[in-house]
Amino acid sequence: MQRAKKPSSTLSPQALSALADQIKTWSQALGFQALTISDTELEKDETHLLNWLDAGHHGEMEYMARHGTKRSRPAELAPGTLRVISVRMDYLVNDQHQAEECLNDPTRAYVSRYAMGRDYHKVLRQRLQKLATQIEAHVGPFSYRAFTDSAPVLEKALAQKSGMGWIGKHTNLINQKAGSWFFLGELYTDLPLPIDPPGQNHCGSCKACIDCCPTDAIIAPYKLDARRCISYLTIELHGSIPLEFRPLIGNRIYGCDDCQLFCPWNRFAQLTREQDFQVRHRLDNSSLIELFAWSEQQFLDNTAGSAIRRIGHERWLRNIAVALGNAPTRPEVITALQKRCDGSSELVREHVQWALAQHQKY
């Protein structure tokens, strides 16, 4: 979403300050839990990004390097950008204990909490557009562009810079009063709004996220090797999941939340009031066998409007096959796997055969 219009008439510092306050009020009415404003200077974050890319820690996510410095230089992505308005929308749909119970039951499928309901991209983009429309009605035409994890944007760095929170050792953004179960969105704008003070780091000596990571993907504080991350392996990776990681995936079939589940700051997280994020198709309490039986049409029907659909039916089955390989050895598990031996793609068959081999060990 972009508007390339004549700049709004010059506003005084007092008027800009009042406008910033008004924008924050509007954002609350639109369902955002917080709104902060930053400038566009990201030199240190750009260095961190380039070092991360040079180390190859992005794996197959070539889009992370595709746009050069546009990701860390907002004005290159959206010319004329002076400020970035960051917004937060909470998405936790049920108590963390329920998530832990699911994770601890190897017969159940664990789906990352952010993917339980409607695709957040659509929800946030629509709200950001409404916010931009309200600003325009108040000040006249201005230039802006809305983003929700949909373009080369260093959203966590920008949110930290404007005081939304701080980037924790697991590389997720943490808010001192709300934890980390939230989505971020941005409005790039040419309005020279007053900026908010940056966030302060409160991780201290805690390393709970590092210690709990099943695959040791957090290779050092504030440094993630995505190639080892279960979220990467189950969502971003298109081919075969490396053998060394399959037993460590457990029952996680789409994403991983461990570093958030065990972060002490998430004791302050609040359940979302957003209906679009509520659980659909019992994805918080389904058995692996039940989801493994979905046909491609069932998968498409049940993931319509969901972030899960992007991985496709083939990778959905690949992931569940691995989880079934990690499940307790029972006749119904063996039967479910054997049913996928014929008529499935080579990728799925490979993971099914691996899973069956795990049960032959016992």
Image (cartoon, grey):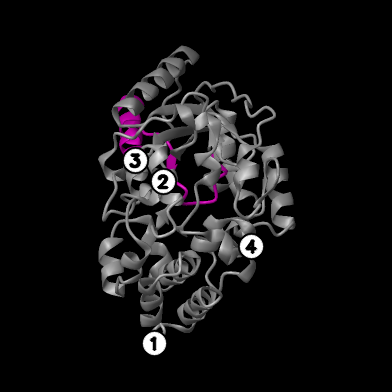
Of badges 1 and 2, nearer the viewer stands 2
Mark 4 lies on residue: 59
Circles 2 and 4: CB atoms closer than 8 Å: no
* Element under disc 3: loop
Mark 3 lies on residue: 93
On screen, 312 above or below 140?
Answer: below
Mark 2 or mark 3, earlier in chain: 3
Distance from label 1 to label 2 (Cα)?
33 Å
User: What's under tag 2, amino acid-wise?
Assistant: Glu
Residue at the outermost front position: 362
Q: Position of residue 20 (x, y in %)?
A: 43, 21
Tag of residue 342: 1
Task: Tell whether 172 sits left or right of 217.
Answer: left
* Element under disc 2: helix
Q: Position of residue 190 (x, y in %)?
A: 49, 33
* Element under disc 4: loop
* Element under disc 1: loop
Of badges 2 and 4, nearer the viewer stands 2
Residue at the outermost top position: 14
125 vs 68, nearest the viewer: 125
Residue 114 magenta: no
Q: Residues within 10 Å of mark 3 (few under 14, many from 20)?
A: many
Q: Residues within 10 Å of mark 1 (few under 14, many from 20)?
A: few
Mark 1 or mark 2, earlier in chain: 2
Which residue is pictured at 62% across the width and 24% down the height? 200
Q: Position of residue 97 (x, y in %)?
A: 41, 39
Of badges 2 and 3, nearer the viewer stands 2
User: What's under tag 3, amino acid-wise?
Assistant: Val
Mark 4 or mark 3, earlier in chain: 4
Mark 2 lies on residue: 101
Circles 1 and 2: CB atoms closer than 8 Å: no
Which residue is pictured at 38% across the width and 74% down the height? 331
